[in-house]
Amino acid sequence: MRRHRRRLGLFVLASGLAVVLGGPFLIPVPPLTGTFPPQTLADDDSEFIEINGLDIHVKKMGQGCPPGIKIKTSWLYGQEVPFFM
């Protein structure tokens, strides 16, 4: 009897955890309103390059070799990452 209660308790706990963690992925999210394309928000000296179907915001900076490029993408939470080519 004790073994069955433990199994039932683990099943209920696992089911609840699955609902809590997976439930939000089942709810549809409405499209955002009032947003602008990144190209309109970029500076005049900005460039956009496409890498594997993803548009990357690029700013060339510095002098000499190698040229430094700061990449700022939304998937990096808006952080600027120095990238040297």
Image (cartoon, rainbow, N blue to C red):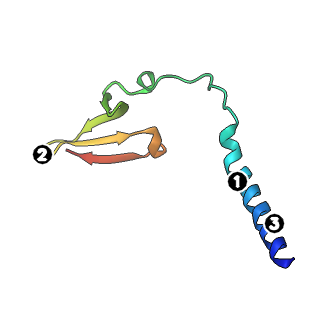
Residue at the spot 12% in from the left edge and 45% down from the top edge: 65
Q: Residues within 10 Å of mark 2 (few under 14, many from 20)?
A: few
Circle number at residue 8 = 3
Q: Could you tell me how far apart the alpha carbons at marks 3 and 2 are, in whole angstroms?
A: 65 Å
Q: In the rendered view, would you say 6 is above or below 78?
A: below
Camera-side mark, 1 or 2: 1
Residue at the spot 80% in from the left edge and 73% down from the top edge: 6
How many marks do you count on the picture? Answer: 3
Q: How crowded is mark 1: few (under 14 residues within 10 Å), some or many (20 or more)?
A: few
Q: Tag 2 or tag 3, which sits nearer the N-term?
A: 3
Type of amino acid under label 1: Ala
Residue pointed to by mark 2: 65
Residue at the spot 66% in from the left edge and 31% down from the top edge: 29
Q: Where is residue 19 in the image (x, y as percent from the top left)?
A: 73, 50
Q: Position of residue 72 (x, y in %)?
A: 39, 40
- Describe residue 60's horizontal placement relative to residue 11 as left or right: left
